[in-house]
Image: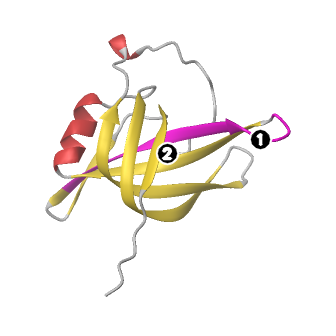
């Protein structure tokens, strides 16, 4: 039997505090992570990834993840998605179901010095 898999790791800054909801008898905490780079022309590109943390991981996310946190998330499944920016233009996004969440910093008092004002899709 042949096995197939996706293994994706995302490191970036959280764009919004986690939103926790119930799906049946499971809890899920969702938040957005911005992953940025400079392209060949030197322009900044940002991809927003929506991270879904289920059950035990949702408790960790809701307790410790805050807007501006630096996190590393690993997932074994993802879905293409989109959001609409302020000018009404659809922008690409990814949805991923996390199976591992690492907090790379602990923001004191919710302020870590990041004041970028980008469109946060969710």
Residue 81 falls in image quadrant: bottom right
Q: Which mark is residue 122?
A: 2
**Extent of the magenta region:** 27-42
Q: Residue at the far front: name it.
A: 1
Q: In this view, does 63 lie above or below 27?
A: above
> How packed is label 1: few (under 14 Cα within 10 Å), some, or many (20 or more)?
few
Q: Is residue 91 above or below residue 32?
A: below
Residue 20 falls in image quadrant: top left
Instruction: Report the residue marked by disc 1.
Output: 39
The mark nearer the N terminus, 2 or 1, is 1
Q: Looking at this view, is 47 or 11 the one in front?
A: 11
Please tell me whether mark 2 or mark 1 is closer to you in this view: 1
Q: Residue 43 location, x and y as percent?
A: 80, 36
Q: Does the magenta stretch include residue 90?
A: no
What main secondary structure does the magenta stretch of the protein show? strand
**Under tag 2, what secondary structure?**
loop
Q: Is residue 29 magenta?
A: yes
Q: In this view, does 64 lie to the left or right of 93?
A: left
The residue sitting at 44% across, 62% down in the picture is: 78
The residue sitting at 22% across, 31% down in the picture is: 63
Q: Residue 99 carries which label?
A: none
**Under tag 1, what secondary structure?**
loop
Q: Residue 21 location, x and y as percent?
A: 26, 51
């Amino acid at each position: 039997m042949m096995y197939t898999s996706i293994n994706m790791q995302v490191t970036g800054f959280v764009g919004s505090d986690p939103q926790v909801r119930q799906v049946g008898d499971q809890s899920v905490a969702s938040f957005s992570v911005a992953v940025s780079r400079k392209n060949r022309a030197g322009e900044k590109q940002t991809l927003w990834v929506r991270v879904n943390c289920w059950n035990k991981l949702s408790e960790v996310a809701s307790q410790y993840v805050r807007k501006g946190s630096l996190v590393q998330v690993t997932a074994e499944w993802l879905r293409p998605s989109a959001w609409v920016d302020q000018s009404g233009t659809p922008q690409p996004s990814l949805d991923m179901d996390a199976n591992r969440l690492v907090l790379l910093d602990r923001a004191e008092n919710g302020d870590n010095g990041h004041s970028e004002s980008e469109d946060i899709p969710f």
